[in-house]
Image (tube, coloured by chain):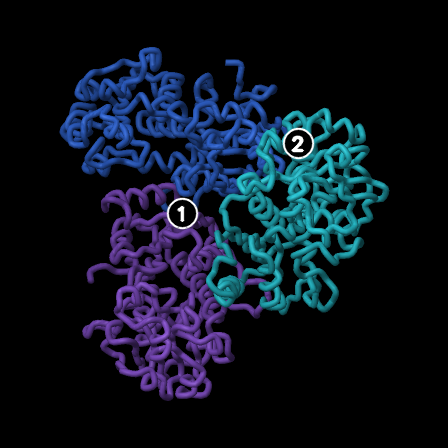
Chain colours: A cyan, B blue, C purple
Amino acid sequence: MSFTQFNPQGHLRHLITLEGLGAPLLTTLLDRADALLRPRGAAPARNQALAGVTVGNLFTEPSTRTRASFELAGKRLGADVVNLEIQLSSRVKGETMLDTIYTLQAMGVDLFVIRDAEAGVHEYVAGHVQDHVSILSAGESHLSHPTQGLLDALTLRQHCGGFAGRTVTIVGDLRHSRVARSAYHALTTLGIGELRLCGPAPLMPPAGEFHRARRCTTLNEGLEGTDVVMMLRIQKERMADALIPERADYHAQWGLTPERLTLARPDCLVMHPGPMNRSVEIDSTVADGPQSAIQRQVTNGVAVRMAVLEHIAAGRLRHV
Amino acid sequence: MSFTQFNPQGHLRHLITLEGLGAPLLTTLLDRADALLRPRGAAPARNQALAGVTVGNLFTEPSTRTRASFELAGKRLGADVVNLEIQLSSRVKGETMLDTIYTLQAMGVDLFVIRDAEAGVHEYVAGHVQDHVSILSAGESHLSHPTQGLLDALTLRQHCGGFAGRTVTIVGDLRHSRVARSAYHALTTLGIGELRLCGPAPLMPPAGEFHRARRCTTLNEGLEGTDVVMMLRIQKERMADALIPERADYHAQWGLTPERLTLARPDCLVMHPGPMNRSVEIDSTVADGPQSAIQRQVTNGVAVRMAVLEHIAAGRLRHV
Amino acid sequence: MSFTQFNPQGHLRHLITLEGLGAPLLTTLLDRADALLRPRGAAPARNQALAGVTVGNLFTEPSTRTRASFELAGKRLGADVVNLEIQLSSRVKGETMLDTIYTLQAMGVDLFVIRDAEAGVHEYVAGHVQDHVSILSAGESHLSHPTQGLLDALTLRQHCGGFAGRTVTIVGDLRHSRVARSAYHALTTLGIGELRLCGPAPLMPPAGEFHRARRCTTLNEGLEGTDVVMMLRIQKERMADALIPERADYHAQWGLTPERLTLARPDCLVMHPGPMNRSVEIDSTVADGPQSAIQRQVTNGVAVRMAVLEHIAAGRLRHV
């Protein structure tokens, strides 16, 4: 693609996809996120890296957790944060969508954090804003959720110490998952040993995608000896569409139970992006068990978002 | 109950009910709230007692006044405040409700301010959060509204100088009122002379409750010589349920008019938790008259919430 | 009218309409707004002029741009800002509307920023608040939008250097436009040379209004030799009401095209309050062209609102 996420000085300007970002940059972001973590219950890391910067959170729904995570990340870095309940792609025409962005940009919004269900919105917007403005994706259709990919990589690295020689298994609705795609980009770039995919056939990704991953036909095959298993949320809509069996059947075939988890390495880490459908894709015994990293993922999410905001702010083109 | 609102060091950790809190603690909170009040129009009291602390306001409706009161209290103490429009108890299952809490806790929310229409939600959540996290109720079903109870006690104390020998009358829908229950706990603990209850028979509380209060059968009996009268909001739903007479009839029997108020002591204070149904439970002449403390209650509410937030933050178990 | 926006010391206390404000005051506000502007991409101007002041934004819809503009203006001046989604005039009775205001006032809200579709709400509220409290209109029915009038005047002054001898043309639904009315008050007070109005006959203002303006019957007549053209947003409701022709017809008669714009002065500035109906009242070539000041208007809007907030805060009656 001709679109680049970097500014002319080679510094990361937008974060819309992890595709095409190199391992050194990803590692820099993970290292910084690690440095921003604090012990449970301690006061969170704070600094003024975003003092004078205005962050606009544009989410369709007012109360998503990702919005809260970005809001806290921005506030802890001293930014002014405004939340707007706006679905950009619902605007009638492209120009109208841009008008919303231009208006906020003219008010001094410097960093836009955007969730949108329509593919291409982020890149389109990024191609039209002024050169001191950055676009961060907080989720784009089924395609990309870059800060989720980073937090997943960070959580894995904290557990495994690194990526080489490690096996990760992603289970569930891979076809519609932006979480899986961003994890794939992060983990393959960072040199994961093996990436396995498994899920119901109608929910497996098209043949041209995830080409460096191994496709497994059963959950048992996917789990055997793996270091990390990432369970994906199954949308009830998929069941309504009859793409997949009902709840109980799904659980029987693809749900992560304590018994099945014994197929993996004894210290296998269990991840889930949330929110979970307990007793469907994952049993509560597993979700709340000692191998679960689900809450650590959320904590890492704030740290990763702070690292990304800091990094982008540091490279901004300022005309003072 | 086995649940305790105190941490192992004996410091108040949660505030879900006033039941079981001793007079010295209540007095400490009221004294501090008094110290946080400023003259009308002066800049509000501010400090950094909650610097580094993140407060999550979880309210079903986005714009309740209690949410604004807690938000301002938190901000004036230097906290990071995030507002989320979430009804915990509407979540399908208990685990899902906890997942929402766990997620926010993992983002660093330290103090949860929760309003919920279902009984037991606050205590259930408090029983599952990490030991540096606190739960504050901003209203629980018909059971408890502790900061309202405190602000009512504070308003009374400012007027009467104390509680001993004083008479308070609560009028209206006592059966469904969390305001009345929290006032009862606060005032009886603080040594009120006499507490009278009156309202339509179907809206009087069950026999086992409010056992230290005197039940009156007419408003006149309730008002005679009282020092303070607290009018409760009558919900229109009660009339639709035919539990009580229509608007005009309710006013005729239980509405506070200037004439009726003359039955009380000449300086009798009039309170109402808001929002009022004017011309139903209270006449505007009374609500806006010289004996009304209704706005002072609101002002006291912010001060009381600051005092509670400060107190709980001071006793937090920090692992630094 | 007996209502005054000034306090007893002659200082501006409320800003509900520009009608009756003198040129020196308007000039002071515009000068200050100019001083608060920063180059594109630079950190915005900040100070602590509103430290200790609480601003309440009361808007019916949660995500209007004007709300975001006032929120950023308040935060950049160090105010505590609370957003409430409240439509005052939808309250059942006048007293109930005031109760909402009284409650927020009692929590320490000092400056109310109110948008309301009902005429008279702002003045009514201003007549009842305590003397340290101010009311700022963010839009009142079809009558007034004072900060928009100021930002329009500022944008014009930046371009033309002044008002004397200049011609401004306002095009569109003048009858229902609070933007046009506030622009009229600002520009005539500041000594504009000529103000022209044009639009479909059913959307022209009643005969008694805009008496210092010249009414034109065609767009061409309105545009000829003008220095500034302000296009108004046409509401789709007007077309549904059959007050005006359909979209395409409206554009043919009253839409600003590049060809028509050549009738004006070569450097004629094009303004629009937003959001635009592109291809209806204005062509994209014009809206995005070199003569467009539409985004500059938005930027000026934040600066003007900061200037107004600062000015009002400086004159507040404080009882410390």
Q: Residue at x 27, y 56 (%)?
A: C118
Q: What amino acid does circle 2 point to?
A: Gly
Q: Secondary structure at mark 1?
A: strand
Front position in the image: B226 or A212: A212
Q: Is residue B228 visible?
A: no
Which mark is on residue A255?
2
Residue C6 drawn above or below residue C167: above
For mark 1, name the chain.
C
Closest to the camera, between mark 2 and mark 1, is 2
Q: Is disc 1 surrounded by few (<14), some (14 to 19) or many (20+) residues within 10 Å?
A: many
Where does the image place residue C294, in percent across and percent down from the top left?
A: 46, 72
Q: Residue at x 51, y 68 (%)?
A: C37
Q: Is residue B248 visible?
A: yes
Q: Are marks 2 and 1 on the same chain?
A: no
Q: What is the quadrant of residue C311 in the picture?
A: bottom left
Which residue carries the number 1 mark? C84
Q: What amino acid does circle 1 point to?
A: Leu
Quote the CA–CA distance across marks 2 and 1. 43 Å
Front position in the image: B237 or A27: B237
Where does the image place residue C21, in percent across and percent down from the top left?
A: 30, 68
Left/right placement of residue A258 relative to residue A56 reads right
Which mark is on residue B171?
none
Q: What is the quadrant of residue C43 in the picture?
A: bottom right
For mark 2, name the chain.
A
Locate the C terminus of chain B by quadrant.
top right
Q: Is disc 2 surrounded by few (<14), some (14 to 19) or many (20+) residues within 10 Å?
A: many
Q: Residue at x 38, y 39 (%)?
A: B65
Q: Secondary structure at mark 2?
A: loop
Mark 2 touches mark 1? (CB < 8 Å): no
Residue B23 drawn above or below residue C148: above
Front position in the image: B37 or B236: B236
Where does the image place residue B240, in percent across and percent down from the top left?
A: 24, 30
